[in-house]
Image (tube, helix red, strand yellow):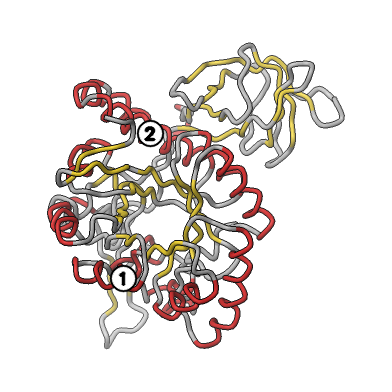
Amino acid sequence: MDKGCVAAGGKMRKTELLIPASNLEVLKTAVMFGADAVYIGGEAFGLRAKAKNFTLDDMREGIAFAHERGVKVYVTANILAHNYDLEGARKYFGELKEIKPDALIISDPGMFTLAKEVCPEIDIHISTQANNTNYLTYDFWYKMGATRVVSARELSLAEIKQIREHIPEDMEIESFIHGAMCISYSGRCLLSNYFTGRDANHGACTHPCRWKYAVVEESRPGEYLPVYENERGTYIFNSKDLCMIEHIPEIIDAGIDSLKIEGRMKTALYVATVARTYRKALDDFMESEEKYRENMDWYKSEIGKCTYRQFTTGFYFGKPDENTQIYNSNTYINEYIYLGIVGDIDDRGLVRIEQRNKFCVGDVIEIMKPNGDNVLTRVLAMYDEEGQAMESCPHPKQVVYLQLDKQPDVYDILRVANVKDPEED
């Protein structure tokens, strides 16, 4: 069986690993660490307005970088548009026509109509925001000219498999397999707009599902009755994160074509960690299910090294219950600290990075490589851009040059274990 191809319903299907990117640096990381495709947002018309997102020039460079390495790029334009959005959207689609992404991700029928009119040569994928919960919906979008539909997160694997059995063979199914879960139905959230005036359906969500809540009795305004799970309160809307690393066979059996990772606001370290882990899991499974099972401890160990909120399988094996929520905190578990990406290695052997967190000469750090290796190395020396020796790099995004006792490659990630000081307890 060819690598990346699986049998579903008696047919051979190509399985795609789809990775998010918040900016050009993260796109390149996703490509180098195992993505088959990357999805990104421009500076407008996507549902991550607070993400750094891509200028048109960045998009052009990112698409070229990906295409040179056989990786596809999809651009989100999945807002629920108002009348005042349409003129700008038409112009935006015209600009994308020149840049040539592989697909547009759209939820709104009006935006779909514009995209088909302005750039009919670009594939259209229907966003999860369109609430795609049954095979007739998939068939509707297929007849309209869409090539792929992203399943609603509220579907079980059994329902997705049933959809696969009722839609045309060349219609693709994309489903989320890892990342944050939204408290609202397929992401259609009104809480943010209600509380702050920032519309989640226009990409400006303030994530009120992560806030701490109390109860107020109508005749006692201002008197907050705490909803206690412990002394820190209760985060009643705070879901655990989706993780399906232990269920690749079931995902493949359901007939899903594209395995989507959530996280278009995540760091390069998060993207590299998740992409590399799922890449290896998929490749191992394609080789043999026995190899996949044998390496499960490695997958679980590595996936736990990125930020997460504890894990759940979401709706895939039944409706979530009280065990899929986190009631006592809205913070991430963060086992590793991101130091930077190897941007270049000069003729002296010095490693150039743009620092993301402080570290010091003498520290033992880890080189994270796309092939799955983690190499411990010691920082022997550190220099600023003027060549002055430094003992540490305390300023975020400072460009520094490192002498390490193990040599990394360009695009490798530098990270360090997040070891808590015992005196903090």
The residue most toward the top is 405
166 is higher (above) or lower (below) than 365: below
- Quarter of the image where the N terminus is located: top left
Amino acid type at circle 1 is Trp
What is the x, y in percent for residue 405? 64, 11
Q: Is residue 288 left or right of residue 71?
A: left
The residue most toward the right is 386
Residue of label 2? 279
324 is higher (above) or lower (below) than 367: below
The residue located at (68%, 32%) in the rendering is 343
The secondary structure type at the circle numbered 2 is: helix
What is the x, y in percent for residue 40? 52, 55
The residue located at (46%, 20%) in the rendering is 373
The residue located at (48%, 36%) in the rendering is 272
Closer to the eye: label 1 or 2: 1
196 is higher (above) or lower (below) than 12: below
**Which label belongs to residue 141?**
1
What is the x, y in percent for residue 396? 68, 41
